[in-house]
């Protein structure tokens, strides 16, 4: 007898793999060793795919001579068939995905591949052997593939899974059936249990990943709690989830994981169960829920720590001192880079460590010019990139070494640095916050990390994902770590990703840009002074690429001096915490979010917060950016940030800004969706006067800006081919409160950006001149020809501004009529028509054409014949 079986809790991957195995072993019978999940039972009950299974009860186990095990490879997963595999004379064949090295079933063949599903493996076998399948079989295999890969979104997905899905689609797989079968409705009992699990949910930070643990007690049996695990994963989106449900005298564990750093199968195995890295389960007897919870948390921590290496958390760009370097030089370096210690190198190898305390004491005792090596720490330990982080506990806590140089095992060269904070954050995660062992100030050295790879796949446009992949490959080619940073990451976390990508590398940014340009097929432009570059696409697309750098300001409001630095240095120079996050694109953990300064918390709290107390001193334009982000996102600047801003205003630091930098920030604010809110905030913060002391923003100007919003909405909808410059209209509104002298002062104050100010002044003058030419519409309604005469040649902005600022409804109607119809009206006659009437070329022709056109606009002639008749009468006169 030949039997095909699977694990105890059969899902669609089990079902599909059993049916697939039947094509390889046609004379074998299929037997479930245990229960099937409810979606599988419902699928089989519908009868759309007739499959014959033999019942386990009454099966003559002693007659089995061949055993085919699919989607399982350990004894506890196959139940009663474990003993069958142990018998002499039984040949066992295993097909499973995600190799773990823990196969404990005696076997003749084990086809175990690193794939997202076992269905993928059988699809590959069919393709390799040229075995054809029916559309129904393709649909069933797609069901198994989609379920175990989260519709190809889990981190366990491999390129072979995509290739298998493509092949199955070509064989007629029905995705409607797949979708319907996977989207199961919950019973009332399941809904109640789901609610209880969600209320108990706790999220722990383990190795940079968000791990959720939930527990509940069911008064009666509830089937398919794995379905509830899928729902919670969809609702809460954790990196990994472990749910515990007590039913009768047993506690059932269901484990799911989307990240490689948390192996669900290993955790379940530690709890007496088993499974794959992405999906596993266990059943625990004889323990109370608190005991099981403690065991589970310990197993999760142990598994996560076992997978985290020093290379995953270390800083790769290290500031160091040379052994012969003077103490005062070392002190200046620590101040510039905002560090409290660094390795000391001699001939390229780590010879010691030096701290700020040692350096400052040496300088105090008159030894500023002595070499660092005279007083450096020589008793220290180094670690290696492949050192498990868990082993650092003795070094960090017992031997109290605050930082550890990371050196290459072979060459001994310095390749990184790991700090006590980084190690503790990685090992203990959230528990540090409860114990108070890691501070929450903005100057922390260790980042808050979580993997956002799945979020990126879900939210980012495929074309933009492709660009990120090109950047990662370019970094791999050069051996550089590559990050996407700034506003792109902020918008991603707000689930509104943009196309404005800002790349950072701890290598050479210019070289990375050139490599990216080659990968994508675009071109690059370099700025060697600032160690930055721009990759430019054929349609004007731009990707900013920078070398991770540190900036220091020679005096307040000056442009920064740029030097090479580490990622943290680069993020620390940015304006606000919400803009100071990065996502690693390549290396051991692509998709890892790096948040050194609490940006995630500030996003959650809707807070705008600077990174240090001298932020507005170094760059006062950040105040205007803060107002812009408040307006755009509905956030608020924090109390400390506001106090620092107000201090900068009292000290008149904004007067030190160049006109170009000031007007650039103002234009950016006026391009926002509701600039009136931002302008009102500028007034509230006493910043408006720095644009010009006499600029006024009162209820009248606010009404003007509201009308501009309304008329812009109408114009953008009706005339998208003739876009108006928003910023110009609102700058006109600001400058309209200035008299002629004030406008001239604006021209003088903003010399470097005079063209912007000049454009606003000229547009205002055109609007004022046109209004004067038309006169009061209240006394009379000018004909369309008069509007054409007054408005002819005017750009979009003065016209719209005139309509928005006029208090007379007739004027607004006249302008909108001119824009929508009069301006677009073509004359009924041309010079050729007049020549056809026998007129000689002269100035008279132009005068006649003008009068006929006016009559046409004013409705005095209707059609070409009447226009020609009027032209004849005018010619006769």
Image (tube, rainbow, N blue to C red):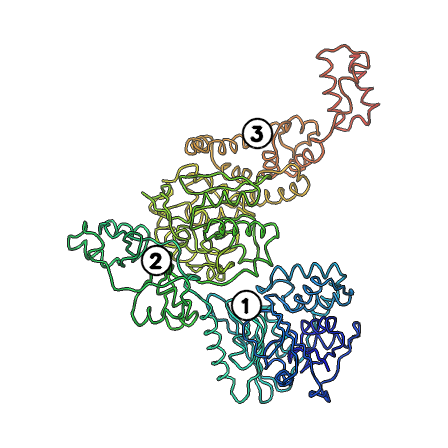
Work out whether residue 558 or residue 285 is closer to the camera in this orientation and state it. 285
Marks 2 and 3: in contact by CB < 8 Å?
Answer: no
* Earlier-in-chain disc, 2 versus 1: 1
Residue at the image point whose x is 60% and y is 59% from the top: 458
Residue at the image point whose x is 61% and y is 27% from the top: 773
Image quarter (top left, top right, bottom left or bottom right) of the C terminus: top right
Where is residue 46? Give x, y as percent.
Answer: 78, 75
Question: On the image, which quarter does residue 74 sit in?
Answer: bottom right
> Pointer 3: what residue?
766
Question: On the image, which quarter does residue 723 sit in?
Answer: top right
Image quarter (top left, top right, bottom left or bottom right) of the N terminus: bottom right
Where is residue 850? Give x, y as percent.
Answer: 72, 20
> Pointer 1: what residue?
238
What is the spatial separation of the Cα atoms under label 2 and label 1, in whole angstroms? Answer: 39 Å
Where is residue 669? Give x, y as percent.
Answer: 50, 45
Work out whether residue 502 or residue 817 is closer to the camera in this orientation and state it. 502
| Above or below 298: residue 721 | above
> Label 1: few (<14), some or many (≥20) within 10 Å?
many
Dot 2 falls on a residue whose secondary structure is loop
* Earlier-in-chain disc, 3 versus 1: 1
> Pointer 2: what residue?
412
Where is residue 55? Give x, y as percent.
Answer: 74, 84
420 left or right of 743 in image: left
The mark found on residue 287 in the picture is none
> Label 3: few (<14), some or many (≥20) within 10 Å?
many
Q: Residue furthest left?
A: 366
110 left or right of 438 in image: right
**Dot in front, 3 or 1:** 1
Question: On the image, which quarter does residue 413 sit in?
Answer: bottom left
């Amino acid at each position: 007898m030949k039997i095909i079986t699977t694990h105890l809790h059969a899902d669609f991957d089990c079902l599909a793999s059993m049916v697939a195995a039947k094509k390889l072993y046609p004379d074998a019978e299929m037997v479930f060793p245990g229960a099937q999940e409810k979606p599988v039972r419902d699928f089989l009950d519908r009868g759309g795919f007739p499959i014959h299974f033999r019942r386990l009860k009454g099966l003559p186990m002693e007659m089995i001579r061949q055993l085919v095990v699919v989607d399982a490879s350990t004894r506890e997963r196959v139940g009663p068939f474990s003993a069958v595999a142990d018998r002499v004379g039984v040949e066992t064949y295993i097909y499973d995905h995600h190799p773990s090295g823990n196969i404990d079933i005696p076997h003749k063949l084990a086809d175990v591949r690193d794939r997202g599903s076992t269905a993928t493996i059988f699809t590959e076998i069919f393709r390799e052997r040229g075995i054809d399948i029916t559309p129904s079989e393709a649909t069933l295999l797609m069901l198994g593939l989609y379920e175990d890969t989260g519709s190809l979104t889990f981190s366990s997905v491999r390129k072979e899974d995509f290739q298998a899905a493509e092949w199955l689609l070509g064989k007629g797989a029905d995705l409607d059936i797949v979708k319907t079968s996977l989207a199961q409705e919950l019973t009332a009992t399941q809904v109640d249990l789901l609610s209880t699990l969600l209320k108990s949910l706790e999220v722990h930070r383990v190795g940079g990943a968000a791990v959720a643990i939930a527990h509940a007690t069911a008064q009666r049996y509830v089937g398919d709690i794995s379905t509830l695990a899928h729902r919670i994963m969809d609702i809460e989106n954790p990196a990994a989830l472990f749910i515990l449900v007590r039913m009768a005298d047993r506690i059932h564990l269901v484990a799911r994981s989307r990240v490689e750093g948390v192996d669900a199968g290993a955790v379940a195995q530690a709890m007496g169960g088993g499974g794959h890295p992405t999906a596993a389960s266990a059943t625990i007897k004889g323990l109370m829920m608190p005991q099981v919870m403690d065991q589970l948390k310990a197993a999760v921590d142990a598994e996560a720590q076992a997978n985290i290496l020093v290379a995953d958390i270390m800083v790769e760009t290290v500031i160091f001192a040379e052994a012969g370097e003077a103490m005062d030089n070392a002190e200046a370096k620590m101040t510039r880079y905002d560090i409290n210690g660094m390795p000391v190198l001699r001939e390229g190898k780590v010879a010691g460590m030096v701290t700020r305390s040692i350096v400052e004491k040496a300088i105090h005792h008159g030894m500023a010019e002595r070499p660092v090596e005279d007083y450096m720490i020589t008793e220290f330990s180094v670690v290696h990139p492949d050192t498990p982080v868990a082993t650092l506990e003795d070094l960090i806590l017992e031997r109290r070494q605050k930082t550890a140089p990371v050196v290459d095992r072979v060459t001994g060269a310095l390749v990184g640095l790991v700090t006590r904070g980084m190690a503790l954050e990685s090992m203990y995660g959230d528990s540090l916050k409860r114990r108070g062992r890691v501070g929450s100030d903005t100057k922390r050295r260790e980042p808050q990390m979580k993997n956002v790879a799945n979020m990126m796949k879900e939210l980012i446009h495929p074309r933009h994902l492709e660009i990120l992949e090109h950047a990662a490959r370019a970094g791999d080619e050069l051996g550089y770590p590559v990050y996407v940073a700034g506003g792109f990451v902020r918008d991603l976390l707000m689930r509104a990703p943009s196309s404005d990508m800002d790349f950072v590398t701890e290598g050479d940014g210019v070289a990375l840009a050139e490599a990216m340009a080659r990968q994508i097929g675009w071109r690059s432009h370099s700025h060697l002074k600032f160690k930055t570059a721009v990759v430019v696409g054929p349609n004007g697309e731009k990707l900013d690429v920078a070398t991770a750098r540190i900036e220091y300001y020679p005096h307040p409001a000056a442009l920064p001096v740029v030097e090479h630095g580490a990622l943290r240095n680069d993020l620390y120079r940015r304006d606000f915490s919400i803009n100071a996050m990065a996502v690693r694109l390549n290396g051991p953990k692509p998709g890892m979010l790096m948040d050194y300064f609490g940006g995630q918390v500030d996003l959650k709290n809707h807070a705008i917060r600077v990174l240090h107390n001298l932020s507005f001193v170094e760059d006062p334009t950040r105040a205007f950016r803060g107002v812009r982000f408040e307006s755009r996102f509905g956030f608020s600047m924090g109390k400390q940030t506001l106090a620092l801003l107000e201090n900068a205003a009292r000290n008149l630091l904004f007067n030190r800004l160049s006109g170009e930098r000031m007007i650039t920030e103002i234009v950016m604010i006026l391009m926002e969706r509701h600039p009136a809110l931002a302008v009102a905030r500028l007034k509230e913060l006493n910043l408006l006067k720095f644009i010009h002391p006499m600029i006024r923003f009162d209820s009248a100007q606010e009404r003007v800006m509201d009308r501009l919003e309304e008329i812009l909405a109408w114009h953008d909808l009706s005339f998208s081919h003739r876009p108006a410059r928003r910023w110009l209209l609102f700058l006109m509104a600001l400058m309209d409160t200035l008299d002629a002298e004030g406008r001239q002062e604006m021209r003088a104050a903003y010399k470097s950006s005079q063209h912007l100010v000049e454009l606003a002044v000229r547009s205002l003058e055109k609007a004022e001149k046109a209004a004067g030419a038309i006169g009061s519409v209240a006394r009379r309604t000018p004909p369309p020809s008069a509007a054409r005469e007054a408005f002819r040649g005017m750009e979009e902005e003065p016209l719209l501004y005139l309509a928005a600022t006029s208090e007379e409804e007739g004027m607004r109607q006249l302008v909108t009529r001119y824009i929508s119809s009069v301006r677009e009206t073509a004359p009924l006659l041309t010079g050729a028509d007049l020549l056809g009437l026998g007129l000689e070329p002269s100035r008279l022709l132009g005068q006649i054409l003008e009068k006929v056109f006016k009559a046409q606009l004013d409705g005095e002639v209707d059609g070409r014949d009447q226009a020609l008749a009027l032209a004849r009468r005018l010619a006769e006169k």
